[in-house]
Amino acid sequence: MNERLDTRMVMRWLPLYELCTYSGSCNRAAADCRYSQATLNRAHRCLEALLAEAESRHLFDLLDTLRTAAQKIRTAEGVCRLEADPFVPLGINGFRLERWARTHSDISRSLQLLGERVCDAFIGSLYELELERGRKIVQFQGQPMLAEALVRTPLWRVAPRQAAAKIGAKGFERLALEPTLHHPRLVRRLETQGYRILPATIRKPRSHEHNVARVINQLQVRGLGTPQSYCVLDQVPIDEDVIGIVYSATYADQQPAFKLLMQQITQDLRQGLEEELLLSSKSLLPLTA
């Protein structure tokens, strides 16, 4: 079976098959990514046929074999499949990315995908990991993951300027967190300060009522619109987050090429994110401005 394994087919269809498996159906997967349902159905049929043949020949570990083969191919080509929070400006780094797992990513799902070797690395908010040091080993389902901080970013309360000017900075007791910031630890901390946290939604952010403030990290400020339309409600950040990278520590030890690739990505991303933070700080306008 392995002798007739088409590596190009594995590289093309395996990510889409696993996306369907993770989403629960090709229908739901198609709603969350840029691939059509027809393409996802084809990927699902191709891999199901391979797995059915493998089971008939008692090759129960074929899916692991396919995953390992695909990961080795990607590493050899200098390509890494990343899952990233939407606000991370990955495009500036020039990496080829698989975007099928990028929408509404969070650290819990990302650790699951890493543990199942569906993606190679996660980049985004690590608030839930309490990453006080520059790096730490995180145990997930018995597998060691290396989590490394890239930048610290302030978390701000923001609101439409017109509404904020009418209500005042202290009139926003209800807070809406972005989906990527809806960490249980952050929710508990804000609730102890007297805020009421609105439930998270997996839908695209909708325009909240005018008496609701949003909590975003500073990397999202430039995506709010014109600096005159939104304002920051506080003089100091409401909290801080760590934007970092997580990947398999075991695989990095086993594959020097993968470890080198992760070091390159970490270095380039840290520089890019620091520049982005500097630019975003110029777009911060307080309520009194």
Image (tube, rainbow, N blue to C red):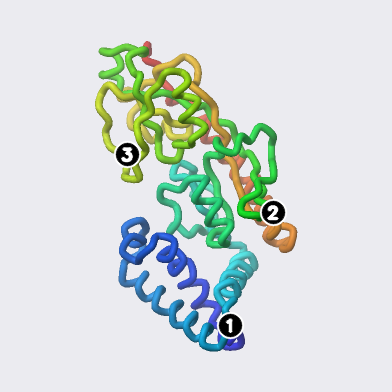
What is the distance, in whole Å, between disc 1 and disc 2 at their CAs?
28 Å
Q: Position of residue 186 (x, y in %)?
A: 49, 30
- Could you say which disc has been placed on residue 205 in the image? 3
Which residue occupies 32% across, 43% down? 204
Rate crowding at label 1 as few (under 14), some (14 to 19) or many (20 or more) other CA atoms within 10 Å.
some
Q: Quadrant of the N terminus?
A: bottom right
What is the distance, in whole Å, between disc 3 and disc 1 at their CAs?
45 Å
Nearer to the camera, 83 or 89: 83
Which residue occupies 32% across, 14% down? 171
Reading the image, the residue beneath label 1 is: 59
Nearer to the camera, 75 or 124: 124
Q: Position of residue 108 (x, y in %)?
A: 51, 47
Rate crowding at label 2 as few (under 14), some (14 to 19) or many (20 or more) other CA atoms within 10 Å.
some
Question: In which quarter of the view is residue 173 placed?
Answer: top left
Question: In which quarter of the view is residue 205 placed?
Answer: top left
Disc 1 residue type (three-letter): Leu
Which residue occupies 40% across, 21% down? 195
| Residues under numbered marks 2 and 3 in contact, where contact means CB atoms less than 8 Å apart | no
Q: Nearer the viewer, mark 1 or mark 2?
A: 1
Q: Earlier in the sequence, mark 1 or mark 2?
A: 1
Which residue occupies 55% across, 35% down? 127
Disc 3 residue type (three-letter): Pro
| Residues under numbered marks 3 and 1 in contact, where contact means CB atoms less than 8 Å apart | no
Q: Position of residue 135 (x, y in %)?
A: 69, 40
Reading the image, the residue beneath label 2 is: 249
What is the distance, in whole Å, between disc 2 and disc 3 at their CAs?
34 Å
Label 2 sits on a secondary structure element that is helix
**In this rendering, is residue 256 above or below 150?**
below
Q: Earlier in the sequence, mark 3 or mark 1?
A: 1
Disc 2 residue type (three-letter): Ala
**In this rendering, is residue 203 above or below 184?**
below
